Image (tube, rainbow, N blue to C red):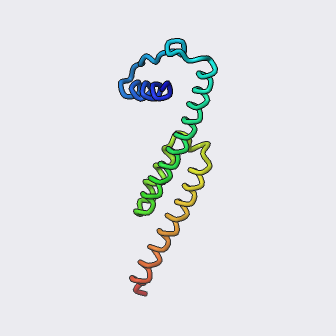
Amino acid sequence: MRKRTAILALALSLILGNSVYVPAAEDTGETAAQETAGTEETQAEQTEEAAVSSDTVLLNAQIMYAQYNYDAAIQYLKSQPDFDVNKDLQGVRRRFRRGRIQSDDDHHRRIQQDHPDPL
């Protein structure tokens, strides 16, 4: 119950931009051990949420890339707050850049084949 209250309070404070009262452990009758366990669970949930958001970022970037929107996909990855430390995002960006360069080269090669120099 405390976990749900804390999540709801956080969501409301983000939406409303002000603080929301969350009862302390003594208000709800919880012991210090229960509070510590709740803190550990909250940290685990935050780590899980970060992983989910990272997966969502990668999925969104891959969708842009699949739609041939290479530059937008690369910019989206670079705009993430943890891009400088996230090796997965950096690796995907490198792969996208190589794919964009290859695509540009293929495009230019097809144009030259379809329209050779008149000389």
Residue 63, given in percent of the width and then of the height, sits at 43, 58
For residue 21, which quarter of the picture?
top left
Residue drawn at 47 percent across, 49 percent down: 56
* Nearer-the-camera pick, 50 or 98: 50
Residue drawn at 47 percent across, 16 percent down: 23
Q: Is residue 42 above or below residue 73?
A: above
Q: Is residue 106 above or below residue 65?
A: below
* Nearer-the-camera pick, 115 or 48: 48
* Furthest-left residue in this view: 16
Residue 61, given in percent of the width and then of the height, sits at 46, 54
For residue 8, which quarter of the picture?
top left
Q: Which quadrant is home to the C terminus?
A: bottom left
Residue drawn at 44 percent across, 83 percent down: 113
Residue drawn at 61 percent across, 27 percent down: 37
Residue 48, given in percent of the width and then of the height, sits at 55, 40
Q: Is residue 63 left or right of residue 83?
A: left
For residue 47, which quarter of the picture?
top right
